[in-house]
Image (spheres, rainbow, N blue to C red):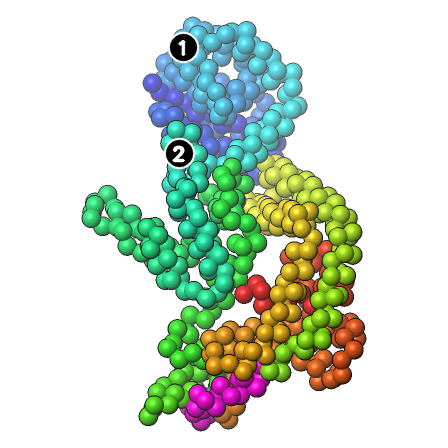
Amino acid sequence: MQYFLYARKSTDVEDKQVLSIEAQLSELRALAKQEQLNVVEVFVEKKSAKMPGRPIFIEMMARIQKGEAQGIICWKIDRLARNPVDGGQIQWLLQNGTIQHIQTHDRAYYPADNVLMMSVEFGMANQYIRDLSVNTKRGLREKARQGIYPSSAPLGYVNNPRTKTIAVDRRTAPVIRKAFEMYAENKYRLEDIANFLHQNKISTRATRRWSSDGGKPHSKDQMTWMLSNPFYYGHFKYSGEMYEGKHTPLIDKRLFDRVQEVLKLRGKKKALKNSPQVFCGLLSCDSCDSSITAEKQKGHVYYRCTRKKGICTEPYVREEMLDFQLSEILARFVLPPEWAAELNRLADKDEKETSQIAAASVQEMRSKIASLDGKIARITDLFVDQDIERDVYLERRHALMSEKRSLQEQSLLLERDVAVWLEPMREWINEAQALTGIAQSQDYPSKKSSLQKVFGSNLTLHAREARGAPQNQWLSLAQAKTDFPKMGLISTVVRRVGFEPTNAYSGMVYSHHPLTTWIPTRTWLL
Ligand SMILES: [Zn+2]
């Protein structure tokens, strides 16, 4: 059986029409492919105000009567019938079998169908001709909302061929979730994650050609792809566009965002491979900005500039000496117990106060979410009306949806547990107190990770001496310790320190509260 494909757009603006018809055609071609319908010719009606009537439609109907095709594919039945005469003609041809099948995006019409039913539909098309655009909008938006799942399920999920949905795989899902959590700690390489999956029997699949192939750890690229796939928090990308999926998310967006930070950070540090010497990757050369490496000579470990950026005369430093310096540096960032106690007391007080503000915040976030929904709907309308380009539409929609998801999670967290906002603060208090033990110990890896928290990548080696500028609250703490060596000045300290609140929380009621300016941002994120 042969089909004609018919697309029409009723707007009068010629240049805007082209895109819309392109969109309609690609939908209809996909529909034909999916239903395995043989399209022999495509008819496109580019009606303008100067040309009354529908010459293309009339031509198509004439050729159907000649027997050139027996079926029509169109977006909606009301695309075909613009007036009762057209409607009547189609009904007549369908009744006498000249047309054997009309396929629209949501249903099929056959000769045996109830004539009355179809009359009503055509009638409605005439009656609500003004609502045509509304219908089309609704149709397109609905399609965008439903989306189409990618053909094969990502790791941790399985395809359900019966329902054509994607379901959580009970065996692998917990492993994938764990992999995200591990990577968020910023202690593992992509290879380590791949090996972790491999150990838990998540490996490459055998290809069709080589059945013995497969069963190997996934590649680094595959891990990057997995760790940056929004599917795991509930959205998915399909032909460049983001959709809210119907599948169950494996992780929340907060964890996902944290993993993205680590991916970004580690991507930059590619040059610094894991070295057997513990302080490698911690410092860079103060003179030439090359990384610092280590080598063993006569039973001692020496750290030196790699001189990758040219000639450099910075001298070697022995590991024992470096360790001594690093310990001394760390000790500067120890939070005195009295200060810690005072901060904890303030945190408790803050918790009480914030729980009262929380209710108001949740309300505010809800209204923001509602306004984002409105924006998403409006921008879809604009796109359907061809008032904005597809690229612009996709980009804005993506941004709005991401913002909405973050807000939803934050508001959920707030509703569930207000104290969660103070957890990073308390964690930091503990961390800063624990430095005293770490500084005195021989636990090199802990020293390294503590120093990385304090300095980020700001630590350099200059004339055998480690130095650097601490970041965020660590800087504030060091300054406070210098300026206010006496206890009891903690309230002054609290008020004068400050660094940017994280983006995720900005705009919230808390962001201007004095105590929350202490919330360690980078340190717990990375
Ligand atoms: Zn150097």
Q: Which mark is residue 98?
A: 1
Q: Secondary structure at mark 2?
A: strand
- Which residue is denoted by mark 2 in the rendering? 160
State which region is magenta.
306-330
Disc 2 marks which amino acid?
Asn
- Residue 327 forms part of the magenta stretch: yes
Cα–Cα gap, marks 1 and 2? 40 Å
Query: Where in the figure is residue 385, as x and y percent of width and height?
Result: 61, 36
Which quarter shows the N terminus? top left
Q: Which mark is residue 62?
A: none
Tell me what residue is drawn at x 41 percent, y 22 percent.
Answer: 4
Q: Residue at image x 60%, y 44%?
A: 388
Residue 517 visible to an observer of this rendering: no
Residue at position x 54%, y 59% from top? Answer: 258
Is residue 306 shown above or below 247? Answer: below
Q: In screen coordinates, is 493 left or right of 67?
A: right
The quarter of the image holding the C terminus is bottom right
Q: Is mark 1 within 8 Å of ligand 1?
A: no
- Does residue 415 lie above or below 269 as drawn? above
Placement of 507 over or under 163, stated as above or below: below
Q: Is residue 480 left or right of residue 395?
A: right
Q: Is 337 on the left or on the right of 83, as rendered?
A: right
Label 1 element class? loop
Is residue 520 part of the magenta span, yes or no?
no
| Residue closest to the eye, 390 or 182 | 182
Question: Which image quadrant is residue 451 in?
Answer: bottom right
Q: Is residue 302 left or right of residue 366?
A: left
Query: Label 2 neighbourhood size at 10 Å, few (<14), some (14-19), many (20+)?
Result: few
Q: Label 1 crowding class (10 Å Cα cut-off): few <14, some 14-19, many 20+?
A: some
Residue type for callout 1: Thr
Vertical placement of residue 122 versus 96, above or below: below
Q: Nearer the viewer, mark 1 or mark 2?
A: 2
